[in-house]
Image: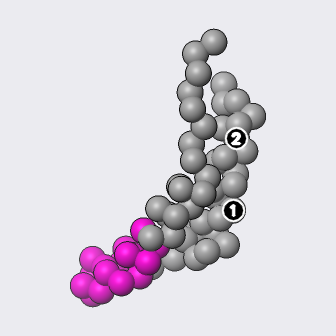
């Protein structure tokens, strides 16, 4: 079962992705432009957002209990 920390980090990351423009619709559009039109700029920008969010909201450490 997910712990409270795992749920909180998941929700915080999801909110940060959406607020910064890495929502599902934007990712789909960026992938399409990258693959179909050879324009990877939006996809790279989204990747940059994802990396920053991962730094700001790190995955909680797994502890065995």
Q: For residue 15, what is the image quadrant?
A: bottom right
Question: What's the coloring here?
Answer: one colour
At mark 1, the secondary structure is: helix
Relative depth, front residue between 54 and 46? 54
- Residue 56's x, y, as percent? 60, 57
Res. 25 visible in picture: no
Residue at (24% x, 85% y) in the render: 38
- Residue 7 — which label? 2
In magenta stretch: residue 39: yes
Q: Verify CB contact (< 8 Å) between mark 2 and mark 1.
A: no
- Residue 50's x, y, as percent? 49, 63
Q: Residues within 10 Å of mark 2 (few under 14, many from 20)?
A: few
Q: Main secondary structure of the magenta part?
A: helix
Quarter in which the N terminus is drawn: top right
Left or right placement of residue 15 versus residue 31 in this view: right
Residue at (30% x, 86% y) in the render: 39
Quarter in which the C terminus is drawn: top right
Reading the chain from its start, which is encountered first: label 2 or label 1?
2
Res. 4 visible in picture: yes
Vertical order, 35 against 13 (above or below):
below
Residue hosting label 1: 15
Left or right placement of residue 49 versus residue 8 in this view: left
At mark 2, the secondary structure is: helix
In magenta stretch: residue 35: yes
Residue at (72% x, 45% y) in the render: 8
- Residue 62's x, y, as percent? 56, 27
Q: Which residues are magenta?
A: 30-47
């Amino acid at each position: 079962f997910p712990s409270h920390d795992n749920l909180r980090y998941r929700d915080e990351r999801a909110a940060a992705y959406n607020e910064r423009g890495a929502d599902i619709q934007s990712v789909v559009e960026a992938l399409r432009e990258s693959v179909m039109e050879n324009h990877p700029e939006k996809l790279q920008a989204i990747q940059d957002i994802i990396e920053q969010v991962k730094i700001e909201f790190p995955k909680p450490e797994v502890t065995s209990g």
